[in-house]
């Protein structure tokens, strides 16, 4: 295989897509201010649905536990970084350490 799918595999790319969609959904939830800004809330619902669809494609050829763990870790880190960039919600040192441990866990499980 060549290109990006040869490097990661199609299932991994669908997990990454699911995580990106989930990150944007989480940021939309925060931007909705408790769904007072309804269009952000609606966007969040649509993005979560698309994220689950992408994850469902990934688990056709990847173990569910691995796919879900990858999705969760990528989504958590991306949401933390997005919350920091967009809303000034800076994670503390223990939060960063926990995220680093989760990344190590993903590499050990994959």
Image: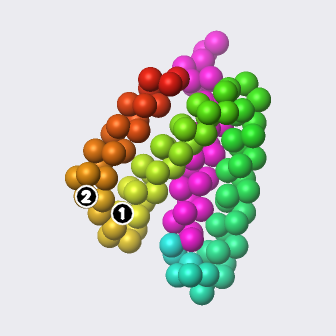
Tell me, what colour scheme is on the image? rainbow
SS for tag 2? loop
Q: Name the residue at 70% across, 66% down.
A: 45
Which residue is nearer to you in this view: 106 or 43? Answer: 106
Q: Which residue is mark 2?
A: 92
Q: How many discs mark residues in the rendered view?
A: 2
* Relative vertical location of residue 88 with respect to residue 3 in this rendering, above or below: below
Say which of marks 2 and 1 sits in front: 2
Which residue is nearer to you in this view: 9 or 56? Answer: 56
User: From which residue to which does the magenta span run?
Assistant: 1-29
Where's residue 100, x and y in %?
A: 33, 39
- Please tell me in which quadrant of the rendered image residue 11 appears: top right
Residue 3 seen from this side: no
What predominant SS class does the magenta segment belong to?
Answer: helix
86 horizontally vs 72: left or right: left
Where's residue 107, x and y in %?
A: 44, 26
- The mark nearer the N terminus, 2 or 1, is 1
Of the 4 image quadrants, the one containing the N terminus is: top right
Residue 56 seen from this side: yes
25 horizontally vs 81: left or right: right
Q: Name the residue at 29% across, 63% down.
A: 90
Spatial CA distance of label 2 from label 1 is 14 Å
Q: Name the residue at 52% across, 23% down.
A: 110
Residue 51 among those drawn in magenta: no
Mark 1 surroundings within 10 Å by alpha-carbon count, few (fewer than 14), some (14 through 19), many (20 or more): few
Q: Name the residue at 43% across, 31% down.
A: 105
Residue ranking furthest to the top: 1
Where's residue 4, x and y in %?
A: 57, 25
Q: Which residue is mark 1?
A: 85
53 horizontally vs 63: left or right: right
SS for tag 1? helix
| Tag 2–tag 1 contact (CB < 8 Å) | no
């Amino acid at each position: 295989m060549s290109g990006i799918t040869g490097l990661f595999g199609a299932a991994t790319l669908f997990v990454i897509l699911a995580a990106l969609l989930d990150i944007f959904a989480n940021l939309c939830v925060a931007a909705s201010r408790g769904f007072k800004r309804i269009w952000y809330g609606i966007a969040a619902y649509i993005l979560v649905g698309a994220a689950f669809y992408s994850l469902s494609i990934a688990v056709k050829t990847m173990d569910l536990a691995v796919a879900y763990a990858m999705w969760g870790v990528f989504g958590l880190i991306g949401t933390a970084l997005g919350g920091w960039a967009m809303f000034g919600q800076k994670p503390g040192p223990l939060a960063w350490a926990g995220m680093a441990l989760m990344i190590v866990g993903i590499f050990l499980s994959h």
